[in-house]
Amino acid sequence: MQKEMLVAGVTIDPMTKSPIVVLRDRENRCALPIWIGVLEANAIVLVLEGVELARPMTHDLFKSVLEKTDTRLQKVEITDVRENTYYAVLHLERGGAVFTVDSRPSDAIALALRCDTPIVVAPGVLLNAVALERGEERPGGKDQLTELLEKMDPEQFSKYKM
């Protein structure tokens, strides 16, 4: 069964300096790190920080096109991971017809944030999630993303392709 995830934030891989978007489940039981490109990371962070730009960026433009064509983004789904590359689809509805469009996960996430649409992850992809400790105090005031990165095996950092 698919699991709805939230964007916990964007961080940087300390070894490759590549951006990582971290998804987490609503219960804070697991987190899914996905290595993404710099431009996509910027598009996600702008929404997370509530930054309004004078001119639309690509994801803003796509949202406007969806609105103008009466097309609704129902959800985005992270569907698969093959050879350390993640895959996603956009679930769209227009005039009663439901269809999917292939997408990179980073673009799907950036669009979902703009459209206030759920992000779901397929069960097979969740096998790559990192379990989070529950109910423990965070020593030294570390944030959850720092703790996640500290828990991850360092060999995991560089094996993902953008």
Image (cartoon, helix red, strand yellow):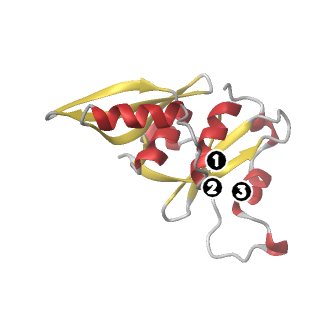
Q: Nearer the viewer, residue 107 or 6?
A: 107
Give the image quarter of residue 128: top right
Give the image quarter of residue 85: top right
Tell me which residue sits at (85%, 36%) in the image.
Answer: 15
Q: Is residue 16 above or below residue 137?
A: above
Q: Which mark is residue 49?
A: 2
Tell me which residue sits at (40%, 30%) in the image.
Answer: 89
SS at mark 1 in the image: helix
Three-letter amino acid code at disc 1?
Val
SS at mark 2 in the image: loop
Q: Given contact means CB atoms under 8 Å apart, are the residues at marks 1 and 2 in contact?
A: yes
Q: Nearer the viewer, residue 100 or 28?
A: 100
Label 3 and label 1: CA atoms lie apart by 14 Å
Three-letter amino acid code at disc 3?
Leu
Residue 65 percent location from the top left of the image? 36, 31
The residue where tag 3 is placed is 145
